[in-house]
Image (spheres, helix red, strand yellow):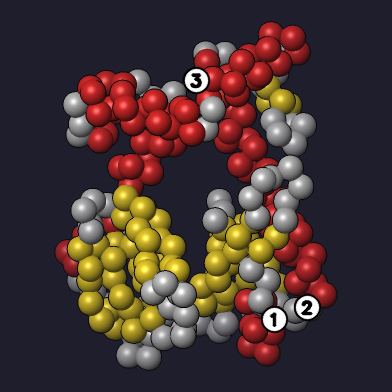
Amino acid sequence: MASMVLWIGGMIGVTMAASEYLSPQEVVASADGKMLYISLATADAVGVFDIASGKLAKQITVPGTPAGLALDAKAGRLYVAIAAVKGAVIAELYGMSHDSMRTLLDADSKDVEAFVSTIRTYFDVETLLKRVKLDFVKNGVVTNRYGRRIVVPDPRDSMLVNSYVQSTGVDVTLLGFSKLVKRLELVAPRSKPIFLLHDALLIDAHRDELAAIKRENTVKVVGYVQKFHLVDTVI
């Protein structure tokens, strides 16, 4: 899920002592725009920030470092991805050893093996590996989902899969935001994109065009099975 961060004239800030710094990472806005939910990495919590008062209203403790947030406004639920689990999924796709996985998850060998098996089955890693390995042997490069040729200096199985997955993910983001920017030129000509950071696009949004921008909540990327969902956060 990608993010549009909409700048409309000023950053909201909170002043606190250095010892109280909570390492804010991810942010999503409530459906009514009155609250911001913020993942607080060093506090193992989610902060609820009241925009009107400019203060942190409360903290909700979670079982681990929060890495991502998704709000289901209709169901009234906030989903929190825990960093260790999210990291372990990515690490498995990128070839982490089982010993390192046990340390990351603080789990025994049996649980790690079950976790790894589930991830590899869900993403059909073996089929992907066979395809990219054949491509590398034949052409000396890995060709990602969009035809971009990736040089892989260290052609271990994990690096072949890694190169395909990471480069394809980057291309999905770039293609999705490219489409979004072209649409915004039509529906919000006074608002301008400022920069792209990983899967977040910062937009200098004109107040009169904010509603039009927020209606742009999905982009279809050719070759990508899922819709390119956009979540807006106003700062």
Q: Residue at x 29, y 66 (%)?
A: 46
Q: Amino acid at mark 3?
A: Ser
Badge 3 marks a residue whose secondary structure is: helix
Q: Which residue is under mark 3?
A: 158
Which residue in the structure is indicated by mark 1? 212
Q: Earlier in the sequence, mark 1 or mark 2?
A: 2
Name the spot of residue 72 as percent of width and height, x first.
45, 69
**Picture coordinates of residue 145, whole percent (x, y):** 71, 34
Q: Which of disc 3 and disc 1 is earlier in sequence?
A: 3
Per the image, the residue denoted by label 2 is 187
Mark 2 crowd level (few <14, some 14–19, many ≥20, 10 Å Cα): some
Note whether residue 119 is visible.
yes
Cα distance between the residues tagged 2 and 3: 43 Å
Report which quarter residue 128 is drawn in.
Answer: top right
Residue type at mark 1: give it. Answer: Ala
Q: Secondary structure at mark 1?
A: helix
In primary-sequence order, the first of circles 2 and 3 is: 3
Is 153 rendered above or below residue 145?
Answer: above
